[in-house]
Image (cartoon, coloured by chain):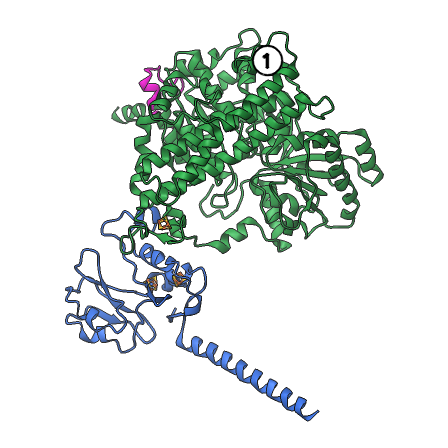
Amino acid sequence: MSSKDNSISIDPASEQMLESAASQELELAWDRYQAMLPQCGYGQLGLCCKICVMGPCRIDPFGQGPQKGICGATADIIAARNLARMIAGGAAAHSDHGRDVAHTLLTAASDPNCDYKVIDEKKIRALAEEFGIATEGKSKEELAKAVAEMSFAEFGQQHGELKFAQRAPDDQKKRWREHRVMPRGIDREIVEIMHRTHMGVDNDPKNIILQGIRAALADGWGGSMIATELSDVLFGRPNPLKSMVNLGVMKADEVNILVHGHEPTLSEMLVAASQDPEMIKLAESKGAKGITLAGICCTANEILMRHGIAIAGNFLQQELALSTGAVDAMIVDVQCVMPALGELAKCFHTKLISTSPKAKFPFAEHIEFDESKALDIAKQIIITAIENFPKRKGKNVCIPDIRENMVAGFTAESVFEFLGGRYRPSYRPLNEGIITGRLRGAAAIVGCNNPKIKHDYGHVTMTKELLANDVLVVTTGCTAIADAKAGLLDPGEALQYCGKGLQEICRAVGIPPVLHLGSCVDISRILVVLCNVVSQGGLGASIADLPAAGAAPEWMSEKAVAIGFYVVASGVYTVLGQPLPVQGAEGLTKFLCQDIEDIFGGKFAFESDPVEAAHMMLDHIDRKRSELKLAPVLYPVPYAPKEVAEAAVAV
Amino acid sequence: MKGSIYVELSKCLSCHSCELACALEHSESKELAKAIYEDPAPVARVRVEAVEGAAIPLQCRHCEDAPCVTICPCEAIEKLGPEQAVIIHEDKCIGCKFCIAVCPFGVVSLRSDGKVALKCDLCLGRTEEGLEPACVSACPSGALRFLSAEELSKQKRQAAAKREYQAAQSGKEQAKEEQT
Ligand code: SF4
Ligand code: SF4
Ligand code: SF4
């Protein structure tokens, strides 16, 4: 990637659409970003406060102007309060998604006429046992009802500890209890952030952040984990499967329906409705060859994981997908849906359909989704799309002829089956691989897209750099989609990027080197994997001991902030491609990038160059390997461990 | 690029972005997150002053007959040419503060170590490359503009001409209405 290169995306399909959009003078996020430059420095540094209307206040980072808000809040206090509120936003989004899934499970379990069913009996039994429910002689519906009710209770619980948080290794739980961040109830922790950051309440930056962490943990080990686990019960646990990705999955001669957003409840029903023979017949009667359903963002990942439905693109491709002119309807629910879509859709025959009572958009048609009439509404939406298809006739349509193969559908359980091979179901091969030095370690790369960095460049470059250095990569969300488009989820293609040790492990165990674990709430699966690796043994007593690291090279949302915090507080070293908005607050920055490690074992680092960031992760992995006194890495790697490099220089 | 900075007061929202951009432009690293921890701290040469609720951004006017140039005892301040910057040569400045005393706008200040005088240099490095001064390009509401005196008077003439034209038009119409 030369520095002179001024392309906007590394993805050829996106580049093609960017050109086409420019020639049609369509306005996209990148144009709006350019128009926004230079962005406000106070905002970037986290130095403005408008929590009360004595303000707005801002701190002069160069020291000439005010150093305190009107109330006396310093840079550290202001930045900490704002950051905690970002965590609250992110944790609320994930957790409200979890609550919706619990609600759907309850409906499915109580109403025999409900279109949703309790699918995964094995999982509901396991969860019921974990929750201490007597399972003997009980039907899966009875158990599901009990588990759904108990999950609801996790949101409103006022004291005690969250159930899923008990899954964490003892060492981590000890740290949480000691520093009073063990989450009590999901909603409570979010409310308490809002209280503490009100004018004149908590004014100790560290204490504010600790409450942020408590809410973040309530997300990762609460709301998100509930979303993942109960979705598995309702829609089935994913298993490895093949599919396709990129804008080229849309077809010129079929009805193209894109689903965009996050929750699986609606998209699951759209999958069913779009495959209904009656619907296909209707499509044919309108002159289409069939119906293509594909997804954008995490709702795409949900139906990919369980049904192999193709993915059209990640976050920054939502507008590009519409710019093809080939979309008959885009159906959106919640989160990461740009308010710009409606106006863009108006340039084409495309219908933008909003479905959630929580999320309405300019120029969208609203067809409200209701779980109790799920299939009927899904059909109504599909019919709307089909009836819109003839309006595309004679219009300029440009679908890039670019798509990639991929394998997805891994979970903490299916990795488990895979890693052990059929007769040895355990995490042993993974741990052994790390212990012997065939694998240097493992990394999780997750997150969004952000026009501040070349589209997909951060994700793909970092992934390749880690693979080359014998690091097994797990991924979710828009990173997974970026990697898939670059061929990194195609086991045949991906192996060429791997170091020798990683190649050996992948061949022996039969896994691809990049494991797609699902949507962003499914980062909870990564937490479970980490717990399993610890309990398998040989790699220390806590997540913080593992030769592992996390990264979000292209993050942009509050949800990513919440994730960053629950991951760091769970003991993971995490490199963010964009800094948290705290850099104008010296004490707070030091706390997050340094001191927090003594408390929780994980910490943040900020680095926008994905290769440099990968090297920082490798340094961390090497440090952990040497603390565990593990054998040196088995094979030479391009970014050699530091001591070895120094020794080589000495010779 | 020759020119001066003109302010449209009604457009200034007092966000102080110009101050930040100016300090950043005069830092070592030119990277915000690093610049704020530099020693000596970079100094903004434009300040937004508050007067009875209004925000007035002020920086050096680069006067054509500049009192600071006249008074400086060591020829440390130089006028580069008509409609060009007045700059302070820091190596010659002895920190006597006479320039601060005589500046009618109060836009000369001292470096954070107090040793030399500082003021707007019209972002010479940027304007030589054809860029606008940092404060001008940072202002989100377009309150700051960089243009030559001729461009400014042309724009003002255009606006005045338009006003007169409109007045004449409406005068004619009025006359017509009165006739009928
Ligand atoms: S809370 Fe304090 S810093 Fe924030 S706006 Fe009010 S007075 Fe200013
Ligand atoms: S022109 Fe340059 S030096 Fe002068 S006030 Fe603006 S940013 Fe500062
Ligand atoms: S950047 Fe523009 S609007 Fe903001 S304070 Fe300066 S002159 Fe005013």
Residue type pointed to by label 1: Arg
Question: The chain drawn blue is chain what?
Answer: B
Residue at the image point whose x is 53% and y is 81% from the top: B163
Specify the chain shown as green. Answer: A
Q: Is residue A393 above or below residue A125?
A: below
Seen at 43% across and 24% down, the residue is A159
Could you say where residue A108 lies in the image, as x and y percent from the top left? 67, 23
Would you name the residue on which mark 1 appears?
A: A125
Specify the quadrant of the image occupied by residue A136.
top right
Which residue shows up at 22% across the image and 69% down it? B77
Occupied quadrant, residue A332: top right
How dense is the environment of label 1, judged by Cα within 10 Å: few (below 14), some, or many (20 and up)? many
- Range covered by the magenta-colored residues: A623-641
Q: Is residue A637 above or below residue A96?
A: above
Asked whether A277 or A521 is in front, the reply is: A521
Please determine whether, in this image, residue A570 is positioned above or below residue A366.
above
